Image (tube, coloured by chain):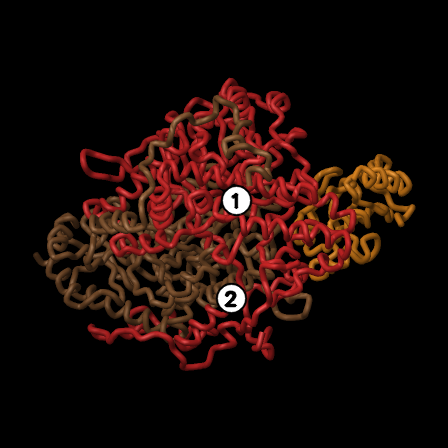
């Protein structure tokens, strides 16, 4: 379910490192909790973001969730297809529906994130609370 | 019912209220009255007001004829006694009329999207200004002094806690239009929006294109305000605006001493998600039939809470329905003909009194009282059961010997002649 | 069994723009008694438009049928129980509509001389006085246009008073059960928001609150009874805690229908509050407004009330604009006067005793519903119920049925649903407010419907999940509406489906 080469946050974002760039998305668990996603608000290319700070938001019909950046750096690419096809976030959150690419300013931050296994356990624990 | 609940009396249901919060005496309000007494009471209050007067007041509230169909429709309990159409399956009546309303507002204003209404024109102005702040990421507002003075006062109330400095741009003392040279000086790279009104408070048509050009050159938005919606039957819509904020009172909404009215905000499609207020959208039901529902609700307070585009919740749906019925009854030809009658009446009256400004006007204009106090002219008219114009000194000290006169399709020629006569007297 | 309704025919109706054909008209203007004017000549050719493109053209009969047919697609209080919690959907007396249309009142211009406006000013003065008596406050402004607008006004008053004392402070405390307007208002008035958690009884946790009240706190915004329909029993203690730190108590009066004649916010420590005339005082909801949101304050806040203030000088009413400390205007003119007329008519019709009896009946009705459906639905907070009760879908969700589904199924039983998924502190909330309007017969039908739906959830959840079944419009696709917004009619977008 959760790709082993991704790094995860407790706020349900993931990042995949490609050289000095981190590809960022939200997890399958996150899209599932939100339900049908109708709109994605993302920063412009060139925006500087910080780890743990708001990167944008995703909206379902009756909810808005902030997306927190898993890494710090500069946004170098934004996934424009989500503007017209937000449903892709429901269909393929770990693949085609990545959100932004960030040029990492502090690659060491990755070490603070969760592994796939840790994230899976974290989600399981969250769900058992309900 | 009490036995089902397991209580001995209704009083038991309040027993948990702490003694110190209880009101231990009856309310000091007289015993209930019959329907007849209530009608009688309000009739008597109506008699104490101006009754049977002809009026030449405008200034944001206009006397237009209200087609009978308007009250017929809004008196239907299905419209009158329903609420915000959260449950689309049993609210298609309200939703469909709001969709039609949004469409007609777009057609009138030349904008691409419109909301389902704001409280009124005056509150639509600060809402539009805050919207411009969100869109541009800038915080300064430049507003023309020819925008309704009370709208500007409301803007000031909202602006003071938004970190939104508001500068005013003067007007040309000859033409009564906004002073474009002054505007050029005041708009800079920190300006979020320029706010103008057309027809402006003096009734004069502003050059929207020129204002847009000045605003846009500095990356600011242009907000165009209208207070007299009937003018849009004849005037070129403010297509160059980024946001239009208006008042619909002219569309079959009783003056009612100032409210309830209905405001609107309309804008370009690209700014839709920054728009405040309810929006209705078209979709389908599970059987594939066309249906309408509230949409883009994530902008709103009940979802986004402190990050909402506005705190507005209840709007003016029934008043917007009045405007919808009005627009339907008059339609494409009627609204134009109505506007033409207003234009003709106002120009008839204007031809008989000294005009203060030279700019082109729609159905109201500023008249000079030739060194006399406007009240002197008005007092004479009151004796003839005519309410004259609005003395402008309270809003524009430099215009203390001038009044704003308005004529509509309801202004009779003989009354206008009486007004003209009073100016000579 | 569905006893209240059976399907009947109602008609399709296209949009006005599809109904329209060139040259049709539904109006007749009088002949012009002055010379016509060439618009392009006096306004300038580039200032005039050729036509309003797309504007409808229909006959008078087509217009009335259009709106009448559409009206039959609506549910309304006039058709039955409308138990939207926190919205107080009570009967809207028709005499109120009639008196609001009396010519001298409806056609009064806000700038007409005060000497010719004494009747309407008397109405406003009388209403201010009665609202002050009902709330136990010292002064009232009728200017705000709706509840949220009243909140904005009230918070600006608090800010102005604190500022006059040297420091407007930084934040507002808002319980997690509050209406969304409260935090949105805080932002509009320039305050940060700190959420206060409710305790297990659904009330503000006094100990937790005390920890949060610092010198940075301007006020607590509290709803009482709160959105669970529970009276905040510690309200006087809560007010003491705020006042001890120089902070104020703002009360959201949305739920005042539970208190009129029984308890007065002014007597339990509230400094400023708003009322919703379209809730407690019966002015019609009109498909979403107009409302009216008068604000009532204690003496120290009165100097800051919006400009202008109504005042009595000798035997005359007059507007006072000379208010050095006022927060300014919150809207043009003086408020939603048409709603003030209706609210005063409601108060006059009830009288002091009648108002109190209405409160008692509203609380009785809510308790009756609570007691009879509690065996079938989870009631997470057991504190005594005032005017509304809040259940959760905890039991039904185990069968895959959520509060939104139960709501849709209620429609098949002939009722408007309750408020869905609010307050947020109850997962899967069903918020039910019957008001005093309803008879035992109507309540029993509703209770039967709720019980029947609970049984359907056990036996045949599909029938609930796919509801409503018998409406002319079935479940509406809100997802597509939000993903691909179509917010106005365009000729190309709907051609060929004129029959709706």
Quadrant of image for the C terminus of chain B: bottom left
Verify CB contact (< 8 Å) between mark 2 and mark 1.
Answer: no
Secondary element type, mark 1:
loop
Palette colour of chain A: orange
Left or right placement of residue B385 versus residue A89 in this view: left
Q: Position of residue B293 (x, y in %)?
A: 59, 60
Question: Would you say residue C193 is visible in this rendering?
Answer: no
Nearest-to-viewer mark from 2 and 1: 2
Asked if C499 appears above or below C310 in the picture, the reply is below
Q: Report the chain holding disc 1.
A: B
Q: Position of residue A34 (x, y in %)?
A: 73, 49
Question: Would you say residue C30 is visible in this rendering?
Answer: yes
Q: Position of residue A46 (x, y in %)?
A: 70, 48
Residue placed under numbered mark 2 in the picture:
C72
Palette colour of chain C: red
Q: Report the chain holding disc 2.
A: C
Palette colour of chain B: brown
Quadrant of image for the N terminus of chain B: top right
Left or right placement of residue C469 versus residue C397 in this view: left
Asked if B112 appears above or below A120 in the picture, the reply is below
Residue placed under numbered mark 1 in the picture:
B311
Residue lying furthest left in this view? B425
Label 2 CA crowd tier, 10 Å (few <14, some 14–19, many 20+): many
């Amino acid at each position: 379910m959760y790709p082993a080469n991704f790094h995860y946050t407790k706020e349900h974002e993931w990042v995949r490192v490609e050289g000095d760039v981190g590809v960022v998305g939200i997890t399958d668990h996150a899209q599932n909790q939100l339900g049908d996603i109708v709109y994605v608000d993302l920063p412009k290319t060139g925006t500087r973001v910080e780890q743990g700070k708001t990167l944008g938001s995703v909206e379902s019909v009756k909810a808005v969730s902030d997306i927190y950046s898993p890494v710090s750096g500069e946004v170098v690419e934004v996934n424009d297809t989500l503007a017209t096809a937000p449903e892709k976030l429901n269909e393929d959150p770990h693949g085609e529906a990545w959100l932004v690419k960030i040029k990492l300013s502090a690659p060491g931050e990755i070490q603070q994130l969760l592994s796939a296994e840790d994230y899976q356990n974290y989600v399981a624990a969250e769900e058992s609370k309900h | 019912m009490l036995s089902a609940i397991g209580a001995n009396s209704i009083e038991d249901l309040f027993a948990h209220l702490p003694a110190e919060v209880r009101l231990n005496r009856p309310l000091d309000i007289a015993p209930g009255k019959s329907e007849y007494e209530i009608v009688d009471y309000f009739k008597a209050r109506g008699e104490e007001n101006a009754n049977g007067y002809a009026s030449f007041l405008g200034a944001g509230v206009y006397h237009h004829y209200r087609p009978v169909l308007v009250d017929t429709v809004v008196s239907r309990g299905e419209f009158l006694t329903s609420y915000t159409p959260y449950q689309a399956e049993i609210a298609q009546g309200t939703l469909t009329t709001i969709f039609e309303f949004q469409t007609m507002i777009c057609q009138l204003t030349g904008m691409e999207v419109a909301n389902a209404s704001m409280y009124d024109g005056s509150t639509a102005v600060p809402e539009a200004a805050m919207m411009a702040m969100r869109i541009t990421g800038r915080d300064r507002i430049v507003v023309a002094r020819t925008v309704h003075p009370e709208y500007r006062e409301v803007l000031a109330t909202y602006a003071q806690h938004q970190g939104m400095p508001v500068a005013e741009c003067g007007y040309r003392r000859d033409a009564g239009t906004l002073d474009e040279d002054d505007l050029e000086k005041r708009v800079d790279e920190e300006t979020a929006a320029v706010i103008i009104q057309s027809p402006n408070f003096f009734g004069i048509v502003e050059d929207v294109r020129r204002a847009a050009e000045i605003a846009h050159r500095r990356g600011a938005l242009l907000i165009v305000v209208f207070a007299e919606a009937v003018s849009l039957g004849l005037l070129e819509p403010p297509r160059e605006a980024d946001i239009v904020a208006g008042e619909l009172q002219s569309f079959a909404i009783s003056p009612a001493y100032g409210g309830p009215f209905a405001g609107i905000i309309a804008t370009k499609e690209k700014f839709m998600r920054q728009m405040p207020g309810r929006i209705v959208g078209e979709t389908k039901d599970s059987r594939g039939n066309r249906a309408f529902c509230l949409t883009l609700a994530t902008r709103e307070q009940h979802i986004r809470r402190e990050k909402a585009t506005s705190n507005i919740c209840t709007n003016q749906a029934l008043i917007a329905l009045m405007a919808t019925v009005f627009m339907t009854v008059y339609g494409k030809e009627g609204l134009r003909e109505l506007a033409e009658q207003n234009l003709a009446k106002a120009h008839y009256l204007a031809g008989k009194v000294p005009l203060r400004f030279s700019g082109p006007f729609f159905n109201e204009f500023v008249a000079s009282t030739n060194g006399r106090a406007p009240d002197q002219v008005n007092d004479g008219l009151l004796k003839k059961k005519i309410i004259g114009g609005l003395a402008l000194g309270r809003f524009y000290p430099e215009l203390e010997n001038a009044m704003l006169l308005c004529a509509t399709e309801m202004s009779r020629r003989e009354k206008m002649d009486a007004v003209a006569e009073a100016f000579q007297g | 069994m569905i006893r209240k309704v059976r399907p009947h025919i109602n008609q399709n109706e296209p949009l006005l723009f599809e109904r329209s054909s060139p040259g049709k008209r539904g109006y007749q203007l009088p002949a012009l008694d002055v010379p016509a004017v060439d618009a392009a000549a006096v306004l300038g050719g580039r200032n005039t438009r050729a036509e309003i493109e797309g504007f409808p053209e229909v006959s008078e009969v087509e217009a009335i049928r259009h709106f009448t047919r559409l009206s039959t697609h609506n549910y309304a209080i006039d058709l039955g129980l409308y138990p939207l919690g926190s919205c107080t959907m009570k009967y809207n007396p028709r005499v109120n509509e009639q008196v609001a249309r009396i010519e001298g009142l409806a056609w009064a211009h806000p700038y007409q001389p005060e000497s010719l406006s004494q009747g309407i000013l008397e109405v406003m003065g009388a209403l201010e006085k009665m609202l002050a008596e009902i709330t136990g406050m010292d002064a009232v402004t009728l200017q705000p246009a709706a509840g949220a607008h009243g909140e904005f006004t009230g918070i600006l008053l608090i800010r102005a008073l604190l500022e006059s004392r040297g420091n407007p402070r930084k934040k507002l405390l808002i319980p997690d059960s509050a209406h969304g307007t409260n935090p949105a208002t805080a932002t509009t008035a320039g305050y940060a928001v700190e959420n206060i958690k409710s305790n297990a009884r659904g009330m503000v946790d006094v100990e937790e609150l005390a920890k949060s009240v610092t010198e940075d706190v301007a006020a607590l915004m509290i709803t009482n009874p709160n959105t669970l329909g529970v009276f905040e029993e510690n309200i006087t203690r809560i007010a003491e805690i705020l006042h001890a730190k120089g902070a104020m108590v703002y009360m959201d009066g949305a739920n005042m229908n539970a208190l009129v004649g029984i308890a007065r916010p002014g007597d339990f420590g509230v400094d400023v509050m708003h009322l919703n005339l379209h809730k407690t005082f019966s002015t019609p909801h009109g498909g979403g407004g107009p409302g009216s949101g008068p604000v009532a304050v204690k003496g120290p806040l009165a100097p800051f009330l919006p400009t202008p203030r109504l005042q009595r000088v000798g035997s005359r009413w007059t507007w006072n604009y000379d208010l050095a400390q006022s927060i300014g205007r919150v809207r043009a003119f003086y408020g939603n006067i048409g709603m003030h007329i209706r609210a005063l008519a409601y108060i006059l019709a009830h009288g002091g005793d009648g108002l109190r009896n209405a409160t008692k009946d509203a609380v009785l009705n809510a308790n009756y519903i609570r007691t009879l459906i509690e065996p079938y639905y989870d009631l997470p907070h057991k504190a005594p119920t005032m005017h509304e009760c809040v259940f959760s879908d905890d039991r039904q969700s185990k069968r895959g049925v959520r509060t939104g589904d139960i709501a849709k199924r209620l429609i098949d039983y002939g009722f408007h649903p309750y408020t869905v998924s609010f307050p947020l502190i109850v997962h899967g909330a069903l918020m039910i407010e019957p008001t005093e309007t309803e008879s035992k017969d109507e309540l029993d039908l509703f209770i039967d419907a709720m019980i029947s739906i609970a049984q359907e959830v056990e036996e045949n959840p599909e029938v609930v999940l796919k509801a409503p079944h018998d409406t002319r419009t079935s479940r509406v696709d809100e997802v597509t509406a939000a993903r691909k917004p179509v917010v106005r009619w365009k000729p190309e977008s709907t051609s060929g489906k004129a029959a709706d």
